[in-house]
Image (cartoon, rainbow, N blue to C red):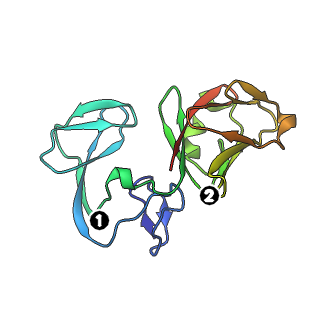
Amino acid sequence: MKACDICGASNDDNSRICNVCGGRFAEKSVSYVYYVRCNTCNADILVQNEKQDKVFCKTCDKELVIDGIVHSVSRRETIAEEELYVEPTLILEEVKSKHKFIIPKEGGVFGRYGQFDPHFFQDERFSRVSRRHIVISYDSDSNKWSVKPNSETNDTYIDGRTFKPSMNSIAVEIRDGQMIGLADIYFKVIING
């Protein structure tokens, strides 16, 4: 098994694309990769080289001054970030925390017990998000993403339109920039590819 450089998910050794986030694995070329830890959110941030003195944390949206390398590891060479999402990818960005959920074109279940970062929802403020709140899918023929509300107890909102639990059979097309609400938690839709 090998870990994805982007999301950390375990993949088969012969995988070329991560089965969780859709990121591509680099060719077999070993190099050292350097990281620093954000002093605000504790995220590990990739550093281009050991002499770099500033870095931008995408998790908490802030520039940091590097005062020391936390760790370095020998692993596959990374690919330029703009090349990582060659496959269609949906990103749901939680509005308050700016936490990003990367949804590959295979789609899946999103919620407290869903396939995408379910540990994020363990905080008490997410208690109204259902275990399997929505089902996300991608249609490669039309190149469109859709969301099907799946909660049996809490409402789903798509750009202000309310979907009651009794309306769960309706799949709704979503577009870049729209807002999706799961109970009282909102996500901005970002579509790549």
- Identify the residue position indicated by label 2 in the image: 106
Residue 46 is situated, as x and y percent measured from the top left of the image, at 29, 48
| Residue 118 appears in the rendering | yes
Instruction: Identify the secondary structure beneath mark 1.
Output: strand
Q: CA distance from mark 1 to mark 2?
A: 27 Å
Callout 1 amino acid: Arg
User: Would you call the spot at circle 1 few (<14 residues within 10 Å), some (14-19), or many (20 or more)?
Assistant: few
Q: Is residue 134 left or right of residue 167?
A: left
Q: Residue furthest front?
A: 142
Instruction: Identify the secondary structure beneath mark 2.
Output: loop
Residue 3 is situated, as x and y percent measured from the top left of the image, at 42, 62
- Identify the residue position indicated by label 1 in the image: 75
Residue drawn 46% across the image and 57% down it: 86
For residue 134, what is the image quadrant? top right
Q: Residue furthest bottom?
A: 14
| Residue 114 appears in the rendering | no
Residue drawn 49% across the image and 62% down it: 18
Q: Is residue 131 above or below residue 60?
A: below
The front one of 175 and 136 is: 175
Among numbered discs 1 and 2, the one appearing first in the sequence: 1
User: Would you call the spot at circle 2 few (<14 residues within 10 Å), some (14-19), or many (20 or more)?
Assistant: some
Callout 2 amino acid: Glu
Q: Is residue 151 left or right of residue 124?
A: right
Residue 150 is situated, as x and y percent measured from the top left of the image, at 77, 42
Residue 132 is situated, as x and y percent measured from the top left of the image, at 71, 44
Residue drawn 63% across the image and 57% down it: 140
Q: Is residue 82 left or right of residue 146?
A: left
CB within 8 Å, label 1 to label 2: no
Q: Is residue 10 above or below residue 101?
A: below
